[in-house]
Image (cartoon, helix red, strand yellow):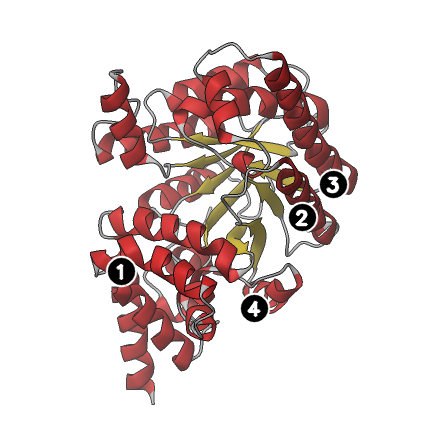
Amino acid sequence: MQPFNLSFSNTKAAFKHKNDSELKKSKFTFSIFKFSFLVNYGPGLTTFALKLGLPIKGMIKSTVFGQFCGGETIDECDPVVKTLWKSGVGSILDYSVEGDESEANFDANVEEIKHTIVKAKGKPEYPFCVFKPTGIARYALLEKIGTGVKLDLEEVEEFYRVKKRFDDIGKTAFENDVRLFIDAEESWIQDPVDDIAYELMAKYSTQKALIYNTVQSYRKGSAEYMKKCIEDAKGYFPGFKIVRGAYMEKEGARAIEKGYPNPIQDTKANSDNEYNEALRIAFEHRNTVSICAGTHNEESSLLLAKMMHDHGIENNDPRFWFAQLYGMSDNISFNLAAKGYNVAKYVPYGPIKSVMPYLGRRAKENSSMAGQMGRELALLVQELKRRKAEK
């Protein structure tokens, strides 16, 4: 057996898909995150300016939007998808429009998600599709169900329509043989999402893992819960996207407000341990379970790669995937891909004005990730210096 040899420090491999101008734009964009005022108020001010028709769209598109989004439409993402795929990195098209909770909008979102699935059919550069449950279901309805409040007749009928939307997307994934991620939500609306997700697995993942539910390891007990889901799976192949989570501050604030124990890990170390335990549990059940390690954490990525190596599993085994957000952690994504691992990037898209709430949420999440922005900046500076020295 060859010795395990994987490093995420090779910036040449990490940024070979970017020219000097693109690297400098990325450096400028990440520099913005140092200013809390811009992180907290920039997205709202930008949305307001766009509504007024101020000529800032080009600037936004070439900086923040261009860094983290593939385009405004599915087809506009094609150049990004092709660029990533040249380095062996797949794309997960993520329709990231948020905010409109009308039934008509939910139905339109279903059609858009189905469009991404049809686009992905038979194309290895699109290894997964994805949707966010609150993009097709009213938040307050899920909250009512998740907190155990009885629904009235209209709400029962509304939830029936929600389940039909989930099934419509799952059926489309099944008919086109495309793996599907169901993204996670806040803890108090996650239970109904989980219930539907496992119903879809039982229906559509009978031959292989096709439906992937999301496990958030910043929640206490998430690894043990995943283990129970695996043990309860009868007649189907469970799939899991394992992430740390994205709602930490909101979760803590609500727990204090409502007077219940905080469901979030007490320390980052606990969250890291929970994440790695989830990887180990899934790996132990690899005969039936498939996973995607959705993480920007180098240690967790190395852990999964090392487990695969030590058990003689090929780097491109279809049961094991790694994923990061487009525009971030390229040192992880492209160095993994260079070694033949299965890697994909989440590629958000949508009209700039409609995607700003998503970008604002991402900005706050990422700026609160300890050291994340500093690492991104340091890697970009390192690669710019390397290129300058070679000239």
Compared with 329, 282 (above or below) is: above
x, y (%) of residue 255?
27, 22
Q: Is residue 296 visible?
A: yes
The residue beneath circle 4 is 83
Sooner in the amino-acid sequence: mark 1 or mark 3: 1
Q: Residue furthest front?
A: 52
The residue beneath circle 1 is 38
Labelled disc at residue 230: none
Dot 4 falls on a residue whose secondary structure is helix
Q: Residue furthest bottom?
A: 391
Q: Nearer the viewer, residue 57 or 310?
A: 57
Neighbor class of circle 2 (other Cα within 10 Å; few <14, some 14-19, many 20+) is some
The residue beneath circle 2 is 112
Neighbor class of circle 3 (other Cα within 10 Å; few <14, some 14-19, many 20+) is some
The residue beneath circle 3 is 177
Sooner in the amino-acid sequence: mark 3 or mark 2: 2
Sooner in the amino-acid sequence: mark 4 or mark 1: 1
Determine the CA span between mark 3 and mark 4.
Answer: 24 Å
